Amino acid sequence: MSIDDKQNRITIIGAELKRWREEKQKAIDEGDVEAIEKCSREIAWLLGERRRLINDVGPLFSLPPYYWIR
């Protein structure tokens, strides 16, 4: 997976997180415990996936630009 693909995936995960958080809030308002647990599991998995991708991409972009040329 290229760096661009990883960055795009990070963006997509952000949108998915927003959707799941909204879904969780709706479940909280309705008092649906099973839906809350399902949303919490999805959110936790997506956060882990996003963190893994950020760690893969991050070190390259944390270096000053003159290191990219090497």
Image: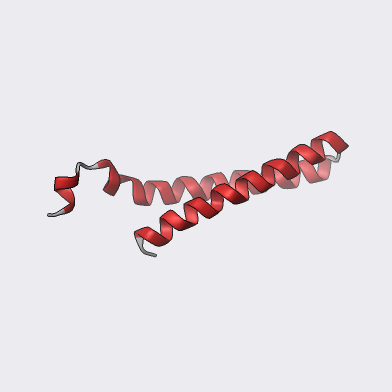
- In the displayed structure image, the side of residue 48 where residue 69 appears, left or right: left
Quadrant assignment for the C terminus: bottom left
Can you give x and y, in whole percent of width and height, for residue 24 in the image?
74, 41
Q: Locate residue 52, reporting x and y percent.
A: 44, 49
Q: Residue at x 59, y 49 (%)?
A: 15
**Residue ID at (49%, 57%):** 9
Name the residue: 38% across, 59% down.
4
Eyeballing the image, is 9 above or below 17?
below
Viewer-nearest residue: 33 or 25: 25
- Residue at the bottom extreme, as displayed: 1
Measured along the vertical axis of the image, is residue 43 above or below residue 3? above
State left or right for residue 34 relative to residue 53: right
Looking at the image, which residue is at 52% across and 46% down? 48
The quarter holding residue 47 reads: top right
Residue 19 higher or lower than 3, as above or below: above
The image quarter containing residue 22 is top right
How many badges with numbers are in the image?
A: 0
Judging from the image, the colouring scheme is secondary structure
Place of residue 39 in the rendered image (x, y in percent of width and height, measured from the top left):
71, 45
Q: Quadrant of the N terminus?
A: bottom left
Nearer to the camera, 14 or 46: 14
Q: Give x and y (percent) for residue 42.
A: 66, 49
